[in-house]
Amino acid sequence: MLKSRKTACWISSARYSQPLDAASSRKWQLMTGLSDYEIRVVGFATSPRPRSFQQHVRFYLLPLLPSSLLRYLTIFSLGHLLLILLALRYDCAIIVAQSPFEGAIGAAAKIFVRLLGRRPKLIIENHNNFEEDVFLQRSIPLKGLYRAVMLALARFAFGRADALRVISSSTAERARHYAPNTPQARFMTFSDTDVFRGTDRRLPLNQAEDIVYAGVLIPRKGAHHLLSAFAQLDHPRAQLHLVGGAENADYANQLRQQAAELGIGDRVNFAGAVSQAELARYFGAARVMVLPSLSEGLGRVVVEAMLLGTPVIGSCVGGIPDLIVDGENGYLVEAGNEAELTAALRRVYDDDVAAMGERARAFAEDFFSPEIYVDGYRKLFELALGESNDAESGGVSERR
């Protein structure tokens, strides 16, 4: 007799195209390796038209409306209703909410469907410093009210979670603050690391001269500090490549103006958003990747750069120190300290960094793979269903 499959329902604010982009397609294709589960995903479309389609798993996509307020209203109303309908129709065993705020939707759905005899388990994911990061990304009107509502939703969600997924020691600590007795599993957000493993370096590390920043252009990522530090670097052949979309258009324009005012406009390339394959090519021609964030859940681009044998300079915030051992596979600097950042950049050019690059590659190879990612979810589901004895040290089952 065939074993019946359980249903796992995801809800998040992620945006999905039809067909899926290459990285999303690879992620959900891998997730079909959880063969005991049928996966259904609630998210946003990339246009105002709602969509439902099957590509590896089943997607139910809400219309993408033009303002963040309308999108919040959409996911907290239509998204909540859709999740309830899916949980009832398919007797959902697991609800996965990809942030504490979507977790509030999952918690409310869990309470409602329990009244009708269903018993889903709720998993909440914490990928960042959710209490502060939004305020470091853009200006928020009525900031005090926004924070109060946000934290109330998070407390409501965490109080009803059966298991938590975290990505770093810092996100684990914040989640434990809200749910001290709830088991955790720790593993990195998805990266199609096969792309980076399969790309050869274009230049040997000690011959490379360029610097790469990888990340969206928002104030929280600290690119303005990197521009100031780069302007102080006495290495005129070096180019700085800012690779990432202008998620905050005003901030991106300020960066361009800053580069011009510092006299480095001709040495700074605003590359925009690129594919994973193109990002790998940037890393493969760089001497160093820099992530000068003011707050960071983990920083998967650190791992992606290291897979190309590229050392990383990162701020000593959030999960970045989980990845960088200062002087071994990169350098750690105080967030916002431009003098320290300039000094670290100079060390990269003064030192023989070939051995550092090899240590970076070895660390990244061990830290993450697509197989580790899928196995992380398998263990996470077991924690939620009470089928695992793998919890350690306060309920953390980790892959480090």
Image (cartoon, grey):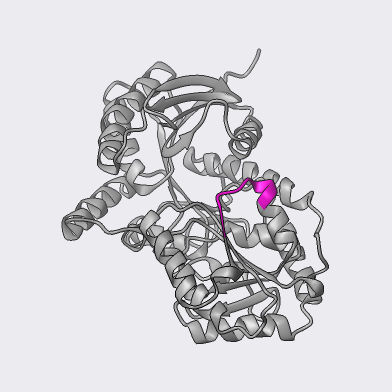
Looking at the image, residue 244 sits to the left or right of residue 212; the answer is left
User: Residue at position x 66%, y 45% from top?
Assistant: 192
User: Residue at position x 69%, y 47% from top?
Assistant: 277
On whether residue 273 falls in the magenta region, the answer is yes
Is residue 170 visible in this depiction of the protein? yes
Total residue callouts: 0
Tell me the quadrant of the picture where the N terminus can be found: top right
Of residue 250 and residue 148, the one placed in the foreground of this image is 250
Pinpoint residue 93: horizontal percent, then vertical percent: 46, 29
Q: For the view shown, which residue lies furthest in the top direction? A: 1
Q: Residue 387's image quarter?
A: top right
Pinpoint residue 209: horizontal percent, then vertical percent: 72, 73
Start-end of magenta stretch: 270-278
Pinpoint residue 385: horizontal percent, then vertical percent: 49, 37
Of residue 329 and residue 265, the one placed in the foreground of this image is 265
Is residue 366 visible in this depiction of the protein? no
Is the residue 51 above or below the residue 21 in the image? Answer: above
Pinpoint residue 304: horizontal percent, then vertical percent: 66, 57
Of residue 11 and residue 268, the one placed in the foreground of this image is 268
Is the residue 70 above or below the residue 309 in the image? Answer: above
User: Residue at position x 35%, y 42% from top?
Assistant: 103
